Amino acid sequence: MLKYIYGLRSMNIINIIMKNTFHNADEAYEALLDEVIINGVDFDNTKALFNCGFYILNPQDNHIKNEQRNWSLKYAEAEWQWYLSGDPNIKKLGELYGKIPPIWERMADSNGNVNSNYGYQWKRKAQIDYVCAKLKTNPKTRHAAISIYDAKEYDKYKKDTPCTYAVQFTIIDKQLCMSVYMRSNDIWYGFCNDQYQFSSLQKMIAYRLNLDIGWYYHHAHNMHLYNDKL
């Protein structure tokens, strides 16, 4: 018989059943994959985990080594360079990677632009400079955050809605720690590449501030695996 906690099935309460600290991205990926297959909830053509949050203690160890996943460092680095360019057009990604992945073609508007180039988003209002200035002025600030998803811009999200709400940075024991908050994250494609981009961002800001790199916390309201990957 399933146990119930406050009216919810305990098997669906991810914070109770899942380890929430990992040494690196690959370890987190392997655990997420197992967890969603075993305990995921059937939700819109996926198996999903709700309010899934965990720490990666060494975020610079950010390569996914799982052979079945066949993760591409070449692509992840091209995507990072695309983010750094701040160019929302998928043609720029094509120049950097040699081709445009079909998923980006589906998400682009008629001009080839997307909302989910996070570099384009954080360059709006010079948010990286803002974060660095806040942390330099007051290392204990709670204002060092980058905003990406904005529901007030929902009219722009007809084909492409950013999955990430925000990224926040905190200095703890002279280390730059980072928290990423996402509305939705696909384990197979999204997490593997997203964690590479965000850990690269953490490294870049730590370098600008002359700080060591601390933990990376990753939270997704809906962490899922599409049924065709089961």
Image (cartoon, rainbow, N blue to C red):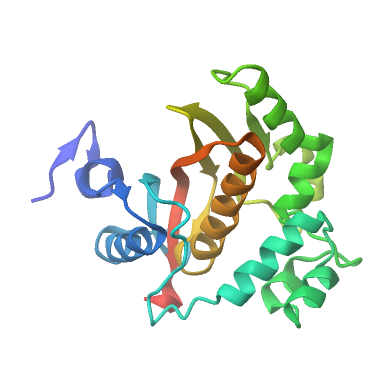
> Taking 173 as reference, is 161 above or below it?
below
Residue under the image location 76 percent in, 82 percent down: 98
Residue under the image location 23 percent in, 31 percent down: 6
Residue under the image location 44 percent in, 54 percent down: 223
Q: How many marks?
A: 0
Q: Position of residue 111 (x, y in %)?
A: 91, 66
Residue furthest front in the image: 210
> Taking 52 as reference, is 108 above or below it?
below
Residue under the image location 86 percent in, 67 percent down: 112
What is the quadrant of residue 205 in the picture? top right
The one of 79 and 184 positioned closer to us in this rendering: 79
The one of 8 and 144 positioned closer to us in this rendering: 144
> Taking 191 as reference, is 121 above or below it?
above
Residue furthest left in the image: 1
What is the quadrant of residue 229 in the picture? bottom left
User: In which quadrant is the C terminus drawn?
Assistant: bottom left
Q: Position of residue 222 (x, y in %)?
A: 46, 50
Q: Position of residue 188 (x, y in %)?
A: 47, 69
Q: Is residue 193 left or right of residue 51?
A: right
